[in-house]
Image: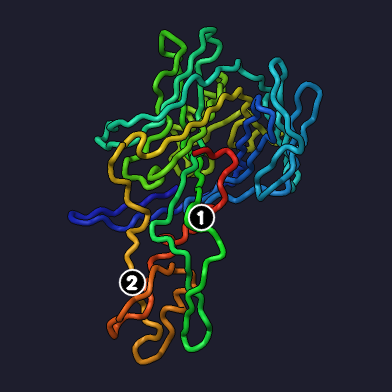
Amino acid sequence: MILTILVGQSCIEEFDASFEDFESAIVIEATVTDINEFQQVRLTRTYEFEADGPSAETNANVSVNGGGVVYEFVEVSPGIYNSVLEFAAQSGVAYQLHITTQDGRSYSSSEENLPAVIGLDRLYADRITSDLGQEGVAIFVDSSDESENTRNFRYEYEETYKIIAPDWNNFELKSTGIECGVDVIPKTEQNQVCFATGISNDLILASTADLDENRVERFMVRFMDRNNYIISHRYSIKVRQYTQSNASAAFYNALDQFSSSESLFSESQPGFLAGNVTSDLNQNEKVLGYFDVSSVSEQRIFFNYDDLFPGETLPDYVNPCMEIAPMLISQGGARCVLSAMVDANQVSYLDLNEDPPAEQGPYLVVPRECGDCTVLGANVTPEFWTE
């Protein structure tokens, strides 16, 4: 790898990077849990610094062997393989991952056993001021294990939040296709209230190895600035606690040192991190990733903005929602203006523009997301959602 950095006295020149002898390696993300569900394996390949991202490893044969049973996996989207049947890892059973790629390369993991089950005692939200001086909402977990069988934990979360379009209207604009005309018509789809979902993309690790008690107490898994629009109305988060073996914890801790927030496995690394999966045919081939067998405990909570900031102003919407009144036809009649914006789904109807000046059109509009929440989420209420 050759890196060139040129720095002047008063400016920073362009960073130029070039890479020699790049070697593509398979990347394996696999965790089998003790929850009866469709287990999942993700297969990608490492990528060069200049590339947009990892490429999926498709058309592979994937299976997990455990207790004399072979659990087959099927590719449900590029590089993502789900088990054909739901199953849960059992205590006292050794599990092994097997992969054969479409070019005939085969890989196997070491045999892994299910760690002791450690329950997630409490999941809760609290209003705090961060170490950086930001006021906001922190999501904390408490967990304990008197048996002290396991002292390593990994956390993932899935958050869902309600979005309410601030400038929603019962009507919308439709281009007539004739002389730049538009009509105001009733909406046929509910797009005032939506729900969006996001997942964690950082490694969130905790260990009690250096503590007197095997207790995770007030461990923060998520922080949101009070001005983050996703907590403006109602917010829900589901946190999963994975109990890890010492070997698994060592791998993920090392990975955490190497990686940034953009990708857990597939980004540029200052070295090679060996996991527990190796090539069956070439022991010198680099394989990145880990086959983990983990016990899981999960909880979900809900809160409203007013629960933590009673009577206080809501965060600003994701868009300032400035209203405009585009002309129907540009000056000189060279092109359509408003109908082109309508056809491109750029605006939402707000109101009639009464007595518009010469440089304005007959309708007031706002950026589309201000009157149509489906730009930011889905207009179907999740099954788990409660008010």
Q: Tell which tag, 1 or 2, sits nearer the viewer.
A: 2
Q: Position of residue 12 (x, y in %)?
A: 26, 55
Vertical order, 191 against 87 (above or below): below
Label 2, residues with CA under 10 Å away: few <14, some 14-19, many ≥20 = some
- Left or right: residue 297 versus residue 319 is right
The amino acid type of the residue labelled 1 equals Asp
Q: Nearer the viewer, residue 17 or 364?
A: 364
Q: Residue at x 70, y 31 (%)?
A: 97
Q: Are marks 1 and 2 in contact (CB under 8 Å)?
A: no
Residue 52, disc: 1
Vertical order, 362 against 146 (above or below): below
Q: Position of residue 256 (x, y in %)?
A: 46, 32
Q: Nearer the viewer, residue 6 or 307?
A: 307
The amino acid type of the residue labelled 2 equals Ile
Q: Residue at x 51, y 87 (%)?
A: 178
Distance of label 1 from label 2 (alpha carbons): 36 Å
Query: What secondary structure is marked by label 1?
Result: loop
Residue 308, disc: none
Q: Which of the colour schemes (rainbow, by chain, secondary structure, one colour) is used?
A: rainbow
Q: Nearer the viewer, residue 385 or 144?
A: 385
Q: Residue at x 48, y 37 (%)?
A: 236
Q: Quadrant of residue 233 in the image?
A: top left
Residue 279 makes an appearance in the image: no
Q: As drawn, which residue projects farthest toward the bottom?
A: 332
Q: Position of residue 305 (x, y in %)?
A: 37, 39
Instruction: Identify the residue position indicated by label 2 in the image.
Output: 324
